[in-house]
Amino acid sequence: MPLTAEARPKGSDVEYRIVDITRYETPRITLADQELRCPECKYPMHVYQSMIRITHFKHNPGSTRDCALSQGEGNEHMCAKQAIAEKLATLRGYEGTRILKEFWLADVERRADICVIYPDGNTEVHEIQLAKTTIDSLEERTNDYRRAGVGDIIWWFGGQADNQNNRVWAKDKLGGYGELSITEGRELVL
């Protein structure tokens, strides 16, 4: 369930641009005149809204299930991306940065949950992990980001991923981590 899509005016040959659905108060209306497609597989997408799930882009019916962005992220994961991006924008040291959700790093074929691009070109990736994972998987993804030239990698652990092994690994390898907590009322706490 991606929060970003490629968009261009319907019927035009203008180059596609990345749009972030969270930046629109009424995305169905605002983006109605736009041709939307998946940044990964290039299949057509549409705005999906409901009372139950966070508003996001969704592949049109008939799309391939092989696309990584058609693999559903849960509401908690999408809410965490939005909450972390909003929090970063208010923190000292992030002035003048570009904070991008679902940023594609072609060199290593990875999509970072959040990528911060500093005015001097340095980058920082924030990865959210809520599902159970292995240290090997964390290492592999972290090493991929390093190969892509990412300066800092910050892991945010919540749910089943918030365990002693992951916290110790992140502290030893990266100097720290972020913690996510989801309350009984489904409220996200950073």
Image (cartoon, rainbow, N blue to C red):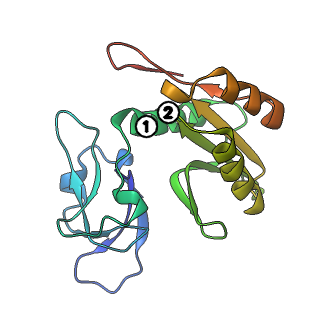
Whether residues under marks 2 and 1 lie with C-beta atoms below 8 angstroms apart, the answer is yes
Q: Which residue is mark 1?
A: 77
Q: Quadrant of residue 149?
A: bottom right
Drawn side of residue 42 relative to residue 28, left or right: right
Check the image and name the residue furthest to the top.
184
- In front: 150, or 63? 63
In the depicted structure, whether residue 115 falls above or below residue 54: below
Q: Quadrant of residue 52?
A: top left
In the depicted structure, whether residue 177 falls above or below residue 78: above
Drawn side of residue 36 relative to residue 6, left or right: left
Residue at x 70% of width, y 55% of height = 145
Give the amino acid at mark 1.
His
Drawn side of residue 44 relative to residue 100, left or right: left
Q: Position of residue 104 (x, y in %)?
A: 55, 62
Residue at x 40% of width, y 14% of height = 183
- How busy is the neighbourhood of tag 1: few (under 14 within 10 Å), some, or many (20 plus)? some
Q: Which residue is mark 2?
A: 130
Check the image and name the residue furthest to the bottom.
13
**Which of labels 2 and 1 is toward the front?**
2
Secondary structure beneath dot 1 equals helix
Residue at x 37% of width, y 45% of height = 22
In the depicted structure, whether residue 145 falls above or below residue 165: below
